[in-house]
Amino acid sequence: MTNPHFKELRHAYGFDDVAIVPGDVTINPEQTSVELKIGNITLDIPILAAAMDGVTDVKAAISMGKLGGLAVLNLEGIHTRYENPDKVLEEITSAPQANVTGVLQKLYSAPIQDDLVAERVREIKKGGVACGVSVTPANTKRLAPIVAEAGADILFVQSTVTTARHVSRSTRGLIFEELCKSLGIPVVVGNCVSYSACLSLMKTGVSGVMVGVGPGAACTSRSVLGIGVPQITATMDSAAARDAYYEETGRYVPIITDGGFHRGGEICKAIAAGADGVMLGSVFAQAEDSPGKGYHWGMSHPHPALPRGTRIKVGTTGTLEQILYGPTSVTDGSQNLVGALKTAMGLCGASDISEMHNADMVIAPSIVTEGKFWQFAQGQVSK
């Protein structure tokens, strides 16, 4: 009788499971650089706003760009299906919670209009900022040439899980190598959570890779499908793939950790774990000028057959500038995100993002709760 073979599991860690160890040398925060480079695009800060209809519209994209970041517009959302998206957004945000999924499914069944796709890109460009837009793999062949011609600066191809090798009935599916060569602008692809998937995507010639499956506040993919990897482990594994690819080819492909954030400390941990940038949704849905007006919902929520999201009420906490740069009077880390990152980098002796990747980290499941009894007792700590 042979010994049976058992599947082996390894530990995986999320933001609340780890902590950053301060460095032996410290630096003034104002002397740190937090630039993010994606292809030929350089952002002043490594923070992107998610391609979700409650987070990013044309106005938000322009505001975010002027503040040094990038807000990515969902080209398969309300803004490209309706000439007047504000009226539709009002219908979504005012719908009773029990009926909102059906409302979303109905509203998102309207066809994507090619002329609106081009128009939204031109509107963002008129604001004098870089234009980032997002499409799903299924619609990339159709929409990518339109956005490139309209003047978009960077294309995100995103779905719950995207791989370099996909099996389907199509005789010729989406081939990233051909897309990158033909488009003429940087292409960022996601999402993935493993070393091998990230490495395979980088080998296709993409300019960046999105990391994260199911951690978003409005996403229910982990419950519905049972898939996902906590963000610290997913980021570390993908960062290892990036470093291996760079060592082999000399081409550096940034990774962007996408989802699971609601305060500055988590951004700092993602960068220390190896991320070059982060993408946030619910945090920016709280901005006074966000299109969701205090509500947030995921890209997979309107799916006609298997919705994987929920509309959540995040409220309104301040302006986009306050959330990014302060000044703030809140103490929970949900505002002045850039200040938090630069301060953490200074305490670790990291002058830029690449040096922050070298910060030591420890497994510390009590990091949020240790010594905080009174804060919990008085409801002042949010996990």
Image (spheres, rainbow, N blue to C red):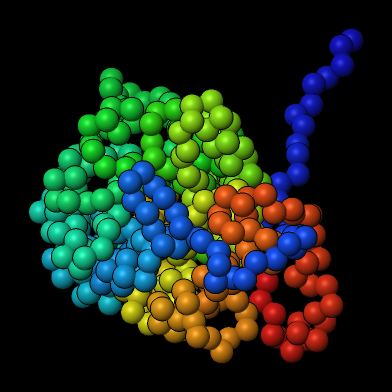
Is residue 111 visible in the rendered image? The answer is no
Which residue does the image show at 23% across and 38% down from the upper left?
184
Determine the residue located farthest toward the right in the rendered image: 1
- Image coordinates of residue 333 in percent, x first then y, are 60, 76
Q: Quadrant of residue 47?
A: bottom left
- Image coordinates of residue 303 in percent, x first then y, are 36, 52
Q: Please indicate whether residue 234 sits to the left or right of residue 197 in the image.
A: right
Q: Nearer the viewer, residue 232 or 92?
A: 232
Residue 304 vs 57, above or below: the answer is above
Q: Quadrant of residue 15?
A: bottom right
Q: Nearer the viewer, residue 312 or 348?
A: 348
Which residue does the image show at 53% across and 78% down from the upper left?
335
- Image coordinates of residue 220 in percent, x first then y, are 52, 56
**The N terminus lies in quadrant:** top right
Q: Nearer the viewer, residue 282 or 123?
A: 123
Which residue does the image show at 19% across and 57% down from the upper left?
121
- Image coordinates of residue 167 in percent, x first then y, are 41, 24
Residue 53 vs 184, above or below: the answer is below
Q: Please indicate whether residue 167 sits to the left or right of residue 13 in the image.
A: left
Q: Nearer the viewer, residue 121 or 215?
A: 121
